[in-house]
Image (tube, rainbow, N blue to C red):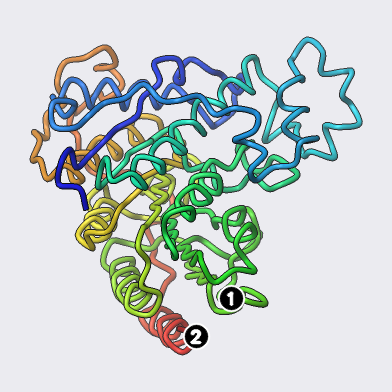
Amino acid sequence: MSGNSPVVYFYDPEVGNFHYGPGHPMKPQRLAVTHSLVLNYGLYKKMNVYKPYRATYHDMCRFHTEEYIQFLNQVTPSNVTEFTKCLSSFNVGDDCPVFEGLYDFCSRYTGASLQGAAMLNNNQCDIAINWSGGLHHAKKFEASGFCYVNDIVIAILELLKHHPRVLYIDIDIHHGDGVQEAFYLTDRVMTVSFHKYGNYFFPGTGDMYETGLESGRYYSLNVPLKEGIDDNSYAFVFKPVVTEVIKCFQPSAIVLQCGADSLASDRLGCFNLSFKGHGECVKFVKDLKLPLLVLGGGGYTLRNVARCWTYETSLLLDETISNEIPYMEYFEYFAPDFTLLSDKGGNDNPHNANSRTYLENILKYVSENL
């Protein structure tokens, strides 16, 4: 651990200006709103802020195929008809549309994750934060679930240059399938995903019986949860699982994907976590005192994504911030209460379908496989 400038934070001023298209739930603008809050709370004074490196074609091909990255580099909304055959083979379409600046967008968010990993390797920080990263569904050959380039896999490959074992933890409501698949056959990366599973919920993978193959057998760990899980139930599984994984796997670095769609009232989610419950997971991982790369991910109720990641930035800095939102460019987004840790309110699924017995059985199965 460096102790020198413990936290670095990456923000590209252009990254919030990209648009997936009208009506699409993924809104890069949430990154601009988050950054504005981080600035106006004064949190930038407590960390080293960097405009990130832009990932190159070669960087992206460390995981993805050249054909796929070449396609992302060439396709635009105006020439998309020339690539009709490629669209279906690369899974580009409704969920993952072609939009203006697509390749540029991928280069920006991936570069920040890669630079964070490199700085951790060089002992230039203890914690690196990239809220624009965490796009965990992208596969080697294709886009998936709003994700085109898997910055997480590329960052982990960078960490593996220096670290014998890397732990990946995912608290997005969706299974971290792209990361699991990438490292399914290796014992150098352990993937641990807590997610909604069942009833055809996207992406349909992440059963607890998916545990890895060959050298990677028992190095993929899944905690399949049901709708409506609350803070207490989530902590009941999260803390013992992570504690036991650390003890058994003994990683020397951690990557934490903090998808905010596991919060109550998310546009696409069905969990019932509060900001404090979600943040408690981040704090718990930070307190393990291992080199840590913190990434964003899902999150589709824009004001709540910004609240969540700003609050979690403060936790990573050990700073206490006011519950009153400071006056800033996007102030009206936080009406009517203008508070950071606003009441959850209006969850469509307040019933917690996760019985204590169900959660205990998951813990038992996980423990037996470690």
Q: Secondary structure at mark 1?
A: loop
Q: Which residue is mark 1?
A: 211
The residue sitting at 36% across, 36% down in the picture is: 305
Q: Is residue 159 left or right of residue 306?
A: right
Q: Indicate the position of residue 62 as horizontal and vertical percent values.
A: 63, 43
Residue 342 visible: no
Q: Is residue 337 left or right of residue 197?
A: left
Is 110 or 241 nearer to us in this picture?
110
Q: Which mark is residue 369?
A: 2
The residue sitting at 61% across, 73% down in the picture is: 212
Q: Indicate the position of residue 340 as horizontal and vertical percent values.
A: 19, 34
Specify the amino acid type for callout 1.
Thr
Q: Is residue 179 left or right of residue 52?
A: right
The residue sitting at 72% across, 32% down in the picture is: 69
Is 283 or 33 nearer to us in this picture?
283
Count of numbered tags: 2
Callouts 1 and 2 close, C-beta under 8 Å: yes
